[in-house]
Every structure is written in structure tokens, then in C-alpha cells.
Amino acid sequence: MNAIATFFMQNIIYLHFFYGLALFALSLVVLLESDRATEFRFAQALRPLAAFGLLHAAHEWLEMFQVLAARNSGQTAGPTGEVIRIILLVFSFLCLLDFGARLLASLETSPWISHLRVAAVGGIWLAAVAWSYWRYRPDLDSLLAAADVLARYSLAIPGSLLAAAALLRERRDFHVRGMSQYGRGLLWAALGF
């Protein structure tokens, strides 16, 4: 197992690059498809999914450049770079939450409710970061590390689960409409999340 961890750490720059590239390319396709006029709830909810991919790709590439700088010149990311990276991370996960919330909510009756729910979850994350600072008084590096970890556990995991549940629900809708071949694709996407 140690050899696998060593392999990934030696090639982390490539992983960040190709992960970001895949997210960027897929997000552009999703963004282009979201402009098509359709009555499907799924197509109407694609914009936040595209925003998730673009923001998360930017996060991955920023992290890649931080690792490159650390390896080549020993220069670590300063507080400004870390804050920008965490902001990209948080907003990408909030967009993922928005995608899932839009699919699971009824868009026709109250489209703004999903935005309020996502804003509330973002507020909870911000409150948790503030509480961590108030309770433990960490230095700036530790606070930024805590903000990163809180974003991954309190936003990324629920966002992934919500998006997966929403895709599974849409899969059933595609089966009802006689579009089972697309439903299988949604199953794979849900498993990916």
C-alpha cells in the first residue's frame, strides 16, 4: 500500500492537471447543452453542475501550481493563495449542492428555495469556521486547513450524496419517458458522485 501512496504523491501534479482538465472539458459540454430549450427538469438544472466543474477545475489547477512551486522553488502558498483556493473549493461544492437541490425540488413552483437552502448550508460552513476560530484560536495556517477540511466534509460529501440521489431520481423519470439508455448513463454518473 505504501508503494501506491508513493506513486500518487510522485505524480500528484499530473493527477491535478488531468482531473482539472476532465472537469473543465465536461463542464464546457454541460454548459453548451444547458442552453438548449427543453421541458426536462434535468436540463434546466445543468448550469450549477457546469459551474461546479469549472470552479473545481480552477481549484485543482491552482493546487497543481502550488505543488509545482513548492517542488521547484520551495515556495509554499501564502495566505492569499490559500484563501483563493478555499473560496474556489467552497463555491464549487455549493454549486454541486445547488444542482442536487434543483433536481430534487420542484423547479416549477419555487425555483428560489433551492438557492436559499444552498446559502443556508454555506452559512453553516462559515459558522463552523468562525466557531473553530473562536473556540481554538488557531494560527492562520491552521484556520485555513480547518476551513478546507470543513468544506470537504460538510459541503463536498453532502453535495455528492445529494447530486447522486438527484441523478437516481432523474433516472427513474427517464425510464418512465422511455429513455432507458440515458437512464443508464445517469446511473454511472450517480455512482461517480
Image (cartoon, rainbow, N blue to C red):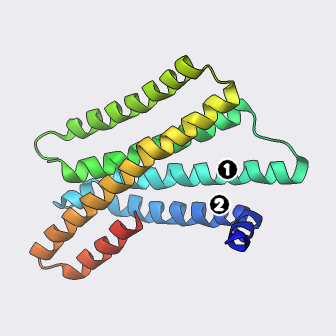
- Asked where in the image residue 3 lies, by quadrant, the reply is bottom right
Q: Rate crowding at label 1 as few (under 14), some (14 to 19) or many (20 or more) other CA atoms within 10 Å.
A: many
| Residue 164, percent from left and from top | 31, 61
Toward the right, the furthest residue is 73
Quarter of the figure with the C terminus: bottom left
Badge 1 amino acid: Glu
The answer to which quarter of the image holds residue 44 is bottom left
Q: Is residue 162 above or below residue 79?
A: below
Q: Nearer the viewer, residue 57 or 31?
A: 57
Q: Is residue 163 left or right of residue 58?
A: left
Q: Residue 30 vs residue 169: left or right?
A: right
Q: Are marks 1 and 2 in contact (CB under 8 Å)?
A: yes
| Residue 21: quadrant of the picture | bottom right
Q: Which residue lies at the image location 58% right of the left edge and 64% below the top edge? A: 19
Measuring 62% from the left and 37% from the top, which residue is drawn there? Answer: 145
Amino acid type assigned to the residue bearing label 2 in the image: His
Q: CA distance from mark 1 to mark 2?
A: 7 Å
Q: Which mark is residue 16?
A: 2
Above or below, comparing residue 87 to residue 4 in the picture:
above
| Tag 1 residue | 63
Q: Nearer the viewer, residue 93 or 52?
A: 93
